[in-house]
Image (cartoon, helix red, strand yellow):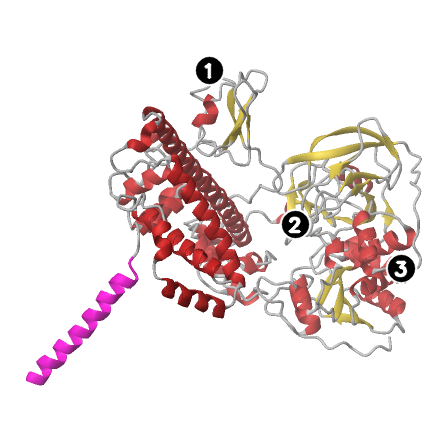
Amino acid sequence: MLTAILALSALSLVFGLILGFAAVRFKVEGDPLVEQIDAQLPQTQCGQCGFPGCRPYAEAIANEEAEINQCPPGGEATIHALADLLDREPLPLNPENGVVKPKTVAFIDEQTCIGCTLCIQACPVDAIVGAAKQMHTIIESECTGCDLCLPPCPVDCIEMVEIKQDMLTWKWPYPEQPIAEKSTPDSPREASA
Amino acid sequence: MSMAPVKLWDFHGGIHPEQNKLQSTLEPSSPAQLPRKLVLPLHQHIGEAAEPVVEIGETVLKGQKVANANGYVSAPVHAPTSGKIIDISEYPIPHPSGLSALAIVIEPDGRDAWVEYTPDQDYTEKNPSHLRNIIREAGIVGLGGAGFPSFIKLNPGSQKKIKTLILNGVECEPYITCDDMLMREDPQSIIEGLHIMRHALQAEECVIAIEDNKPEAFESISKAAAGLDGVRVALVPTRYPQGSEKQLVQVITGKEVPSNGLALNIGVVCHNVATAAAIYRAIHLGQPLISRMVTITGKGVKRPRNLEVLFGTPIEELLQQCDAEFDQIERLVMGGPMMGFALHDIALPVIKTTNCIIAATREELGLDRPVMPCIRCGACADVCPVKLLPQQLYWHAKAKELDKAQEYDLFDCIECGCCSYVCPSNIPLVQFYRFAKGAIWTQEQEHKKSDQARERHEFRLLRIEREKQEREAKRAKKKAPRPQAASPKAPPVDGATMATKMREEAISQRESAAAARKTEIQAALARVQAKKKGTAPKTDEPPAADSSTSPAQKSDLDKTDASSTDSANNQQVP
């Protein structure tokens, strides 16, 4: 009886020490969940979710202050990825936040641009180059298509251009599959039967 | 032939579809008529599209380069005949997407006048890299169907030794007979090309593989290759998809190309027979790639045959030359029935990868088979030449579970179509794999882009924060006027003490540099002397900043203190 108590106490002490050591040694700084959620978001930084950027939205999801269906640029794919990650039911995209649109990049009409730098200040990814009273232009490869440069422009010289598909970006579409769930009378199986 | 039979190995699965090759080999090949207009797409190969080097209105000669290779994996484009450039703009191209792309349009002048070219007879004198350059400049890409720039596949890399060079004359897909015709009619060009390739690769041995449904081609090639050292001609039993590079390598060498690897990794290089003939023309005759053999077949044409076609020739004109019944044609396919794709327009041009045009009638297609649910019969796994589990891949691709599809080695799929061919439920399996591959690539690209955007956004936030801090610091500085140092915390620092401190620092720096050079004995001596002298030098130090400096400053001072003491002592040494 005594040996059993002693043995169990010794064991619990040893495991307690191991766990205590592990808790200190392998302590994780910050919230890894936020990082994981942030990794699924498209990083357009557009703010359509109602938060100032993708990371704040990720934090809000982690704190259960926001739903997973508030990201229009990510669309269905992002919602599914988040649902998988957080083990929740996928929801349809919340129409209050916007609708899924084809991917675009901003384009500045250089004839109209007055060089006010307002769009440069609005761009969340520094994808606009230019200086005061100098013409501005978009770095196409860096533009996330967030639309944030449109409202501040006083002369409306920015427009969003749909990204054109070429042979290198084209991908095979999802096969449309008219599955015949019930065999129709003219199907071969029925005919042979 | 007296050649010893080549030992052959086997590959998994495969099918025996109806051949349909005989009808297009009944008459010898002939050159197609010069078309009224040639549309030359700039993207006829794998890799980046070529860049035009001509302008509208310019006249060009046959074989003149009209577009330059753009980057390493790319190929130039040459004028197939002499004439005038009448347009450079977007035209529909033969591609499964049905998209348009930049093309150069040439109006032939009918003279067919060649540009001046320099034949190069003594290629063996040339460095292999020089040969590769000629082949690259001649715009030669793999003519088996994929269109990968050939010069890259003729580069063995720095340390790799090439054991076997395989010349692929298998042509396993039904209907296609262009390589068969070429082997029958022009074996000499192929053998000459083989010699050049062998020289470029420094390959130990060469094997020309031909399926046993082409006895005439085997006969003709065997005759041409008779007596050549280290060149064997292998007659391989007919089975689809034996012409696929990885499967053929396995049949000839018994070695399997590793997953995610190349044949090059196991010391084997594989080229198509037509590519060999094109390389012969480029090196020996100095002619770039401007035409190819194309099989025009299917029940929609009354006179199926092979034509030597200039690139850019509209398919419609070829069909006319083969007596097409246009109202009978249900679908136009480029490539074979297994891996080809439907063309959306009969005016599309022939490009470097066009090996076959099938004008299929309704009766030939048998379109009306309904798609049924998968019954997990496993027939697809039996025929898969890569030993994948097609039904598993199908389930995951259908459910868009891309990561799971990848776990089942989706990217090892060669899209041969054997699984779709045997599927009793008529499921278009390959289409699902193509979709899944594309979706995964798109996802990867988007991830890359979003990572980049995140980095830029975080940097921007950091920059804004830094600018804010700098501004605040500036403002704080402006608010507190000059005698800011008079705050109660810091003691007054007058010019004299500052000067002393600076002098001390200078001395200590000079000293530490000197001390590094001195031996330990000298240092020890100095210490002994310092002990003897007592703390006398310390009294020379300014007493300022002793009580109320910040700890960091204090330790700094302490340091200078100590070193200056040392320096004082050292100065006493000599």
Tag 1: Cα neighbours inside 10 Å, few (<14), some, or many (≥20)?
few
Residue ID at (58%, 41%): A169
Residue under pointer 3: B123
Q: Residue A14: within the magenta?
A: yes
The Cα atoms of the two marked residues, 2 and 1, are separated by 53 Å
Q: In this view, does B378 lie to the left or right of B339?
A: left
Residue under pointer 2: B340
Q: Position of residue B395 (x, y in %)?
A: 44, 55
Give the amino acid at mark 1: Pro
Q: Is mark 2 on a helix, strand or loop?
A: loop
Q: Where is residue B4 in the image (x, y as percent from the top left)?
A: 81, 79
Q: Nearer the viewer, mark 1 or mark 3?
A: 1
- Please provide the residue range marked out in magenta: A1-27
The N terminus of chain A: image quadrant: bottom left
Tag 3: Cα neighbours inside 10 Å, few (<14), some, or many (≥20)?
some
Q: In this view, does A127 lie to the left or right of B469?
A: right
Q: In this view, does B456 lie above or below B530?
A: above
Mark sitting earlier along the chain (3/2): 3
Give the amino acid at mark 3: Tyr
Residue under pointer 1: A154
Give the amino acid at mark 2: Gly
Tag 2: Cα neighbours inside 10 Å, few (<14), some, or many (≥20)?
many
Q: What element carries label 3?
A: helix
Q: Is residue B423 left or right of residue B299?
A: left
Q: Is residue B167 left or right of residue B259?
A: right
Residue ID at (73%, 40%): B50
> To which chain does the residue with label 3 belong?
B
**Foreground residue, B369 or B536?**
B536
